[in-house]
Image (cartoon, grey):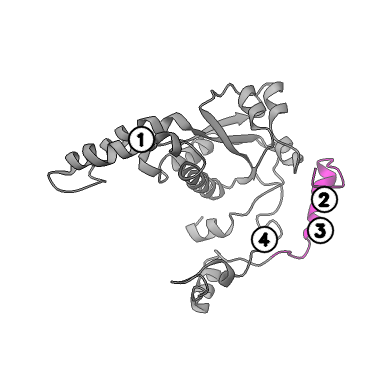
Amino acid sequence: MELYDAIGSRRSFRFLDPDRPVEIEKIQKMLEAARLASHFGNNNAARALVVNRATATEEQLESLPSPVGGYQIQQAPIVILWYIEQNAMDEAAQRLVELVEAGALGYGPDRFDELNDVLVPIMTAASENLKQPGLVDMDLGQAVAQATLVAIAEGLGCCCQGSANWQRVEKAFGLPESCRIVVAQTVGYPAESREAGGQRPRLPFEELFQYNAIDNPFPRSEAVVEELKAQRMIQVPAKLPGREEEIEALRVKYELPRSGMI
């Protein structure tokens, strides 16, 4: 699948086939992409714990979030718990040294002196603050995004879930106090059509992006829009004909409650 097509198809698939296992190699490809994503200071605080429904314990499965869209968690063959290892920030100085050694940071014969005299003290002093939600969570988001693109390209579907009690999940899976789960991602083969009813609603482009000033919308070229439509990044808006019938058929097949919100 082409990149633009994968981006355009990167909508949440909320109906996953519970009877079709996901090849472990495809999950590895997702994690390889996450590992190579951009990380602030090369700290690699973004981590993932993969949960296989077929082999997880009852306690682990019961701890997974399900207040909203619970059927998604219950159907998914794989759930990835994306979390932050906060203690990774304690090694910030060493990660910077690695970047300099790799030729990715600094230049000139005095770059190590500047690193040790300026950047290392700054990063060391800021390590506790850097563990808080902010840059490290942005890094995790980039890792999840890249993993999701790979999943779509491999024919899988994904959907991200939150929880009001991550502590229960962290306890069930034995995560130490230094680890903070940010999101759970369901993964499996879509039980619904690839279009999933069409592109989900978004606010107008002009309301979201600005150019040089907050009151100056970014100029949107219709030629670019048409180009992206041709490459399937911008796809037909929801809801496509037959979507209601598709949802009802899935509800009946998997014996889901009439209200799909819980």
Query: Does label 1 or label 2 sit earlier along the sequence?
Result: 1
Give the residue displayed 49% in from the left and 35% down from the top.
28
Q: Position of residue 60 (x, y in %)?
A: 67, 24
Vertical placement of 9 versus 135: above or below?
below
| Quadrant, the C terminus | top right
- Residue 256, percent from left and from top: 83, 42
- Label 2, label 3: how far apart the Cα atoms are: 9 Å
Q: Amino acid at mark 3?
A: Glu
Q: Nearer the viewer, residue 49 or 165?
A: 165
Say whether residue 257 is magenta. yes
Disc number for residue 244: 3
Label 4 to label 3: alpha-carbon separation: 15 Å
| Dots 1, 2 in contact, CB < 8 A | no
Q: Along the polypeptide, which appears first: circle 2 or circle 4?
A: 4
| Residue 40 falls within the magenta-colored stretch | no
* Residue 18 in view in this figure: no
Image location (x, y in percent) of residue 48: 52, 34
Classify 10 Å Cα crowding around label 1: few (below 14), some (14-19), many (20 and above).
few
The residue shown at (61%, 30%) is 51
Secondary structure type for disc 3:
helix
Front label number (1 vs 4): 1
Residue extent of the magenta highlight: 238-262
Q: Which mark is residue 251?
A: none
Label 2 belongs to which residue? Answer: 249
Q: Mark 4: few, some, or many residues within 10 Å (few <14, many ≥20)? A: few
Circle 1: element type: helix
Amino acid bearing label 2: Ala
